[in-house]
Amino acid sequence: MSSKTDPRSDTRIPRLSSLSALEFTVLIIVGAVVIVSINDVSPSPQRFVEGLPRMFKLVERMVPPNTDPQFLWRIFLRLVETFQIAIAGTAIGIALSIPIAWMSARGVTPLAAGAFVFKSFVSFFRTVPDLVWALIFVASVGLGAVAGTMTIIVDTIGFCGRFFAEAMEDADKEPQEALDAIGAGRFTVLCGAVIPDAMPSFINTGLFALEKAVRSSVVLGLVGAGGIGQELKVAFDLFQYQNASAIILAIFVIVLLMEHLTDRLRIRFS
């Protein structure tokens, strides 16, 4: 009779059997936090059912959307402003992200130990929400598109700065070593080896940043940072629900077109 244990007799789940006591405790705590959070803030079935009639009543008041030519022209101008905020903010943000990412990328930065400062700088920009930056800039420079553009710049630096740095760190090392061997400086290595190898990732990240900026610039208008969001806020504040539905449809079309455009560009440059 074989002394080997039949593997089918071991009914323990391999993943759970490998957990330490501390890991199992942390897992239980995380599960408890999730359950308590769902219980405290998620809508109950009763509240959801009670809210449905009010939701349908609101939709009825939003239909049909306002199609007045003068109103649509004003919305068109606001959409143009929204695009300008997104494009200008993204372009400036990407231009500033490249040197910041260079300074923070391990193995590429000319600052060595100082890279942590720039990495923390990018993390801070990324951590603070867009609406908070918008409120800060509205308080600093006043209402309007300038505050929105400055918000998009900061948001783009936080987004692109991180991914640009990672792309630089993952760039092929052989061309860099070859340039180092002939005495090239850090900036020459950056321009001659790092950026050309990381360029597809740069383009992909930049397009995602532009797509993100278009959606963000819509929301920023809700706090007075310019764009179509201001018109949407005014429509809801004045209970002009037909105006609001027209603005929402316009935003949907613009975001859909932007996603289609960026998808095509990503395929083209990938």
Image (cartoon, rainbow, N blue to C red):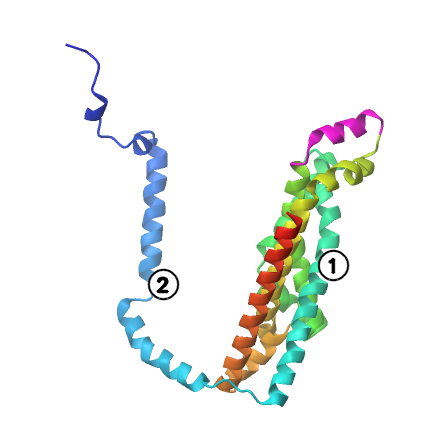
Task: Classify mark 2: residues with Cα within 10 Å, few (<14), some (14-19) or many (20+).
Answer: few
Residue 144 drawn at (x, y percent): 68, 75
- Disc 2 residue type (three-letter): Val
Outermost residue toward the right in this view:
183
The amino acid type, in three-letter code, at marker 1 is Ile
Q: Residue at x 34, y 63 (%)?
A: 42
Residue 174 located within the stretch drawn in magenta: yes
Q: Which mark is residue 52?
A: none
Range of the magenta residues?
Answer: 170-183
Q: Is residue 79 magenta?
A: no
Residue furthest to the top in view is: 1
Q: Position of residue 245 (x, y in %)?
A: 50, 80
Check the image and report above or below for 259 versus 26.
Answer: below
Q: What residue did someone put label 1 on?
A: 92
Picture quadrant where residue 200 is located: top right
Q: Which residue is mark 2?
A: 41
Q: Left of 31 or right of it: where is 156?
A: right
Residue at coordinates 70% horizontally, 33% vertically from top-left?
Answer: 107
Q: Is residue 223 above or below residue 201?
A: below
Task: Return the residue nearer the eye: 17 or 171.
Answer: 171
What whole-number distance in Å separates the C-alpha atoms at marks 2 and 1? 39 Å
Task: Tell me the mark number nearer the camera, choosing from 2 and 1.
Answer: 1
- Mark sitting earlier along the chain (2/1): 2
For numbered disc 1, what is the local secondary structure? helix
Secondary structure found at label 2: helix
Q: Residues within 10 Å of mark 1 (few under 14, many from 20)?
A: some
